[in-house]
Amino acid sequence: MRQSVYLRLAVFLVQLDVKREDAQWRREHRRVQVHLPYHLSAYMLKDIGIDEEQRMAPHLLSTSASRKVRHLRREYKSRLVT
């Protein structure tokens, strides 16, 4: 027996929706990778919130440090390019 066109279309649309949701989740939970021009010790990296894979690790930062990083990031992004 062959599947109907409507059934195939429904399966295709559900697959697209699942892929879209997966891509959206990955975008929201992407971990930012940091490229530092010089070598820092593991302890210093942990202090600034970067794990051993050179990725941002928000769970390593204290609340005051994460707040400061957030403000610095916002200030950096808001600078006018001249």
Image (tube, rainbow, N blue to C red):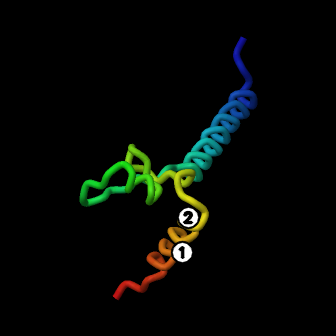
Please identify the residue farthest to the top as the structure is shown: 1
Tell me what residue is drawn at x 58 percent, y 69 percent: 67
Q: Determine which of the numbered discs, if any, sits on residue 66 in the image.
A: 2
71 lies above or below 66: below
| SS at mark 1 in the image | helix
Q: Nearer the N terminus, badge 2 or badge 1?
A: 2
75 lies above or below 70: below
**Closest to the observer, 31 or 81:** 31
In the rendered structure, the answer to whether residue 37 lies left or right of residue 16 reads: left
Residue identifier under label 1: 71
Instruction: Categorize mark 1 by other alpha carbons within 10 Å: few (<14), some (14-19), many (20+).
Output: few
Q: Residue 72: give x, y in percent of width and height.
A: 48, 74
Identity, as a three-letter code, of the amino acid under mark 2 = Ser
Q: Determine which of the numbered discs, if any, sits on residue 3 in the image.
A: none
Q: Residue 16: give x, y in percent of width and height.
A: 63, 39
Foreground disc of the pair 2, 1: 2
Tell me what residue is drawn at x 50 percent, y 51 percent: 57
In the rendered structure, the answer to whether residue 58 lies left or right of residue 80 reads: right
| SS at mark 2 in the image | helix
Please identify the residue farthest to the front as the structure is shown: 43
Q: Residue 33: give x, y in percent of width and height.
A: 41, 52
Q: How far is mark 2 from mark 1, CA to CA? A: 9 Å
Please identify the residue farthest to the bottom as the structure is shown: 82
**Closest to the observer, 16 or 54:** 54
Instruction: Categorize mark 2 by other alpha carbons within 10 Å: few (<14), some (14-19), many (20+).
Output: some
Tell me what residue is drawn at x 53 percent, y 71 percent: 68
Image quadrant holding the C terminus, namely bottom left
